[in-house]
Amino acid sequence: MELSQRVQAIKESPTLAVTARAAKLKAEGKDIIGLGAGEPDFDTPQHIKNAAKKAIDDGFTKYTPVSGIPGLKNAIVAKFKRDNGFDFTAREVIVGVGGKQTIFNLVLAVINPGDEVIVPAPYWVSYADITLVAEGKPVIVNCGIEQGFKIAPAQLEAAITPKTKLFMINSPSNPTGAVYTLAELQALGEVLKKHPHVLVATDDMYEHVNLSGEKFVNILNATPELKDRCIVLNGVSKAYSMTGWRIGYAAGPEKIIKAMEILQSQSTSNATSISQVAAQEALDGDQECITPMVKAFRERHEFVVRRFNEMKGLKCIKAGGAFYAFPDAREAIADLHQRGLLKEASDMALSEYLLEKGVAVVPGSAFGAEGYFRISFATSMSNLEKALDRIQQALA
């Protein structure tokens, strides 16, 4: 049986694969600390769970409008106004089955075969593969640790061609935690203003996981003139520890949002009714529930960055947001390979080696950055202490 070229062009999500492998080894009795999964280790706040329970008891278990229930869409409109200063209408908003589906629908809605999508690397694992599913061409722009993992205006300018259709920007970033300043976004906006054929997608999923305390801004704050070609992507997964509830959302030009709705009507239809009610409560309810989680992430962030910089062959810079550390391990990889501890000088070989030592990490090549690796510090401090001790011993 011949599978489609479409599915053969892409790979399984590496982060999910690492997590599944770590779980399999644990089930076999091996002592593995998994630092692969990108989800908070906190429970969903009680008031959000209560809203979902009430929805079940009230019988809110039928189909809903494909693009989302009116209450949730209004909550999203209010959130954008309150937190970001954006004016959207309910017709410019869509609710999806997680943030990944909204990105998937967006790319399928706007990309034709051969269209180019500019993706700064390191990038979230799915941007490139989703582009390939749509028969587009991912244009990867390398932005290493030397430039703080952020694309420079000159790099963006050089990457834009007549075939460029979409520019993806993710801040705070998964996997690096890099956050663009207002000035940096304004400089990118000046480039984009010169190229009106380029759409802009800003993935703000980690907006509220703020490690620096600086006010969050995205490219639409920096360059409001882009509004007629900018799509803002977000969700409740990270801020409210609701990964399994699968609710993401997007706002943008009504024509694009409607196209995304048409696609969704032929795939999943509506997001789960109960989850939509829970997400509405998350956005409308008391936002203080975010504070203790972010406080813990800040403490863990300081700890892991300090520890990595004490280790032989690693270099790690501070993140501005999200809950990841993304150390440069090129020196460590070369050293381990030279000593015969790695079969080859690659981050894949390093991640295999660390797994043998009891720690699951995601190789940087999964994010378009060979020679790095990602850990999630969305786990307990005791787990982090044990895991980083093992990594330090493995490198030494």
Image (cartoon, rainbow, N blue to C red):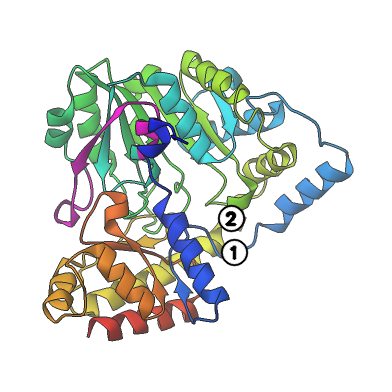
Q: Earlier in the sequence, mark 1 or mark 2?
A: 1
Disc 1 is placed on an element classified as loop
Mark 2 is on which residue type? Ser
Residue 259's x, y, as percent? Answer: 51, 17
> In this orientation, which residue lies closer to the viewer: 246 or 276?
246
Among all residues in the image, which is located at the extreme top? 255
> In this orientation, which residue lies closer to the viewer: 155 or 321?
155
Disc 2 is placed on an element classified as loop
Mark 1 is on which residue type? Phe
Residue pointed to by mark 2? 241
Mark 1, Cα crowd under 10 Å, few <14 / some 14-19 / many 20+, is some
Q: Quadrant of residue 41?
A: bottom right
Q: Are marks 1 and 2 in contact (CB under 8 Å)?
A: yes
Q: Which mark is residue 170?
A: none
Residue 30's x, y, as percent? Answer: 50, 81
Q: Is residue 382 magenta?
A: no
- Residue at image coords 77%, 47%: 52
- Residue at image coords 42%, 56%: 15
Q: Quadrant of residue 107?
A: top left
Disc 1 from disc 2: Cα separation: 6 Å
Q: Is residue 140 magenta?
A: yes
Give the magenta part as a residue range: 129-150
Examine the rendering and report whether any part of residue 366 can be seen: yes
Above or below: residue 101 compared with residue 162: below
Residue pointed to by mark 1? 42
Above or below: residue 214 compared with residue 310: above
- Residue at image coords 57%, 27%: 94
Q: Looking at the figure, which quarter contains the C terminus? A: bottom left
